[in-house]
Image: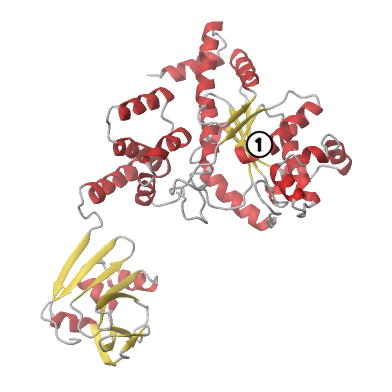
Amino acid sequence: MQTHAVCARQSIFNNIMSKKEIETEIRRQFDAIKRGSVELIKEDELYEKLYYSISNSVPLKIKAGFDPTSPDIHLGHTVLLNKLRIFQEFGHIVYFIIGDFTAMIGDPTGKSETRKPLSKEDVLKNSKDYKEQAFKILKPEKTKILFNSWWLSNLKLDEFIKISSNYTVRRMLEKDDFEKRFQDNRPIAMHEFIYPLLQGFDSLFLEADIEIGGNDQKFNLIVGRELMRSFGLTTQVIMTMPLLEGTDGKNKMSKSLGNHIGVSDEPNEMYGKIMSISDEMMFKYYELLSFVANKELAELKIELDKGLNPIIVKKRLALEIVERYHGKLLADKADKYFEDKFQKKTNPDGITSVEFDNIHWRKFIENIGQGSSDFGGTSIEPSDMVRINGASLLMHINAVSSNGEAKRLIKQDAVKLFFKLYNKAVNDFREIEIKLKDDSKTAYSIPSDPSEFILKVGKKKIYKIKLKNNQKNA
């Protein structure tokens, strides 16, 4: 059974809609498209473009440019991608422009100094990663991936001079960061003036209907609009989107600030990070990252005002986003993990307790002499140097299915032991970590009288080993 939205789109492209139906469809698209945006230049032009598109069964060209400055995409980057997906849902075509040429110049947007350009090798590698991650959101059949080097590298000098003659130095200095640097007598390189012109030429070359960018890109988007007007083309509509704050709720989401949520984060980690955002930030995340309809979102806000627990609404958001990047099965598992660990206070990490006596412990260690009584510069109880047969230990507690698997994990540095050391000087305990090596000759300094320790095998298996009736380094 087809949904109303699908039927509506089919009727658009069958060109059998009445004027009233066209107006209704325009309003439906307009409301969804505008949601969460900072600015539309201009709204009446967008209305006209939608009217023409729906009346004539012609999809609009939606352009967005991405400089592949980093191979990693976080949820802040997906704000634009989500908006592009909304356009695709209405049948429009997305022109996903990878700025491989412009990235080698360096966009000065929002910078107080010239940004270092990327090498061709870095650009190509990052572009490949970008495309793979972008298609987790975008529809491949409604996406045209283009590299702007395809046309910019063939642009002749006389052609570029003609383009640049349509923009003045005064207009360039209206760009905020250029103006500040000029007033502070800080250098502005000539190639930085070239960047907005080249990005604008992308729109001119493609004859874009709409261009989307972050609100820090507004100046560059306007350059494209004005170049199109100078060359007698119908100007593109500009839509700017806000910059998404990170998990700290204050600063722009950034990997360098540690407040980011990566699209490649593990499901449990991604779910937990989303749940950590404040209730105040939650609806901004909904508006920019969720595909929940406006009407339903308004109903959620009403329910909250009536006393609905915010955690219920936030869990719905986390579940939707994790499912988008990892699938329903892993999203459901992440939801249960969070519920068990933070709501029911159970132990979803699966820590397994194992207890054995001195006889068993002697099977896994070889005592080779007393080590230093000073560990890490801190006086502790005398330690003993021992060799540990890690493979046998893993086999004994059933952490692995074979001796070969045990050796492989040890070789991959995936097996760690954690002991607590007692420091008499400060009457306190400290934890030391031992990473087992694939070397039978390696010796480790361990507490002289361990009663228990933690053994981590890989990312998920954790064992608490208790030694009963233990004697000194038995």
SS category of the residue bearing label 1: helix
The residue lying furthest to the right in this view is: 158
- Above or below residue 358? Residue 122 is above
**For residue 179, side relative to residue 313 (left or right):** right
Tell me the residue at 51%/44% (across/down).
76
Q: Badge 1: few (under 14), some or many (20 or more) residues near its Cα, within 10 Å? A: some
Frontmost residue, 399 versus 28: 28
Front-most of 165 and 134? 165
Q: Is residue 19 left or right of residue 324?
A: right
In the rendered image, which residue does mark 1 sit on?
A: 218
Where residue 405 sits in the image (x, y, percent)? 32, 69
Quadrant of the image containing the N terminus:
top left
Residue 81 % position (x, y): 54, 37
List the single residue furthest toward the bottom.
369
Location of residue 200 in the rendering, given as x and y in whole percent from the top left corner: 73, 37
Instruction: Tell me where residue 327 appears, x and y as whole percent.
Output: 38, 42
Where the C terminus falls, by quadrant? bottom left
Give the colour scheme shown: secondary structure
